[in-house]
Amino acid sequence: MRSHEERVAEAKRRIAAREHTDRRRRDRRTVALAAAACLALLVGASLAMPGIAARIQVNDYTGFETAASIFRNSAALGYIVIGLLAFLLGVCVTVLCFRLRQMHREDTQDAESEGRHGAD
């Protein structure tokens, strides 16, 4: 027969285990959603680029003697779009890597705390 304290400790352990599995499930959904958003961004950008590139047609390259002349004849639109897409992709990858690292840290901390407390 278990004592009252043992039953309370076992109930607390079960609650903590359930919260841990719920948190992991929620974190996995978040990572999957972020990965899907990155993939959608890449697919959308790849589908949009032919149309953007078709609108950017510079027939005369004689006006590009200086570095600042890239903004002439709306050629800057291509540079701006590519720069923004590269920035957005970098942000998405950084957020994904940060979340994965944070999840890994939480898992190792949970494993260490379970090892210390003797929980399975």
Image (cartoon, rainbow, N blue to C red):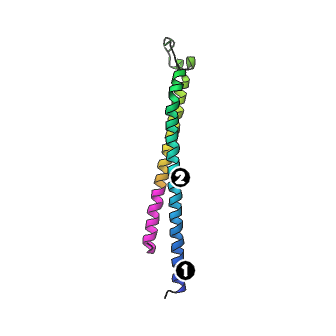
Which residue does the image show at 50% across and 69% down from the upper left?
17
Which residue lies under the disc numbered 1? 8
Expressed as whole percent of the image width and height from the top left, the position of residue 50 reads 50, 26
Which residue lies under the disc numbered 2? 30
Is 101 in front, or is 57? 57
Look at the picture and state if 115 lies above or below 49.
below
Which residue does the image show at 49% across and 41% down from the upper left?
39
Q: Determine whether the residue tagged by mark 1 lies in a helix, strand or loop.
A: helix
Is 70 in front, or is 1? 1
Amino acid type shown at disc 1: Val
Amino acid type shown at disc 2: Thr
Judge depth for marks 2 and 1 and give the one in front: 2
Q: Earlier in the sequence, mark 2 or mark 1?
A: 1
Q: Are marks 2 and 1 in contact (CB under 8 Å)?
A: no
Which residue does the image show at 46% across and 58% down from the upper left?
105
Q: Is residue 104 magenta?
A: yes
Look at the picture and state if 120 lies above or below 2.
above
Q: What quarter of the picture does the C terminus occupy? A: bottom left
Q: CA distance from mark 2 to mark 1?
A: 33 Å
Q: Please report the bounds of the magenta region as a residue range.
A: 103-120
Expressed as whole percent of the image width and height from the top left, the position of residue 99 reads 50, 52
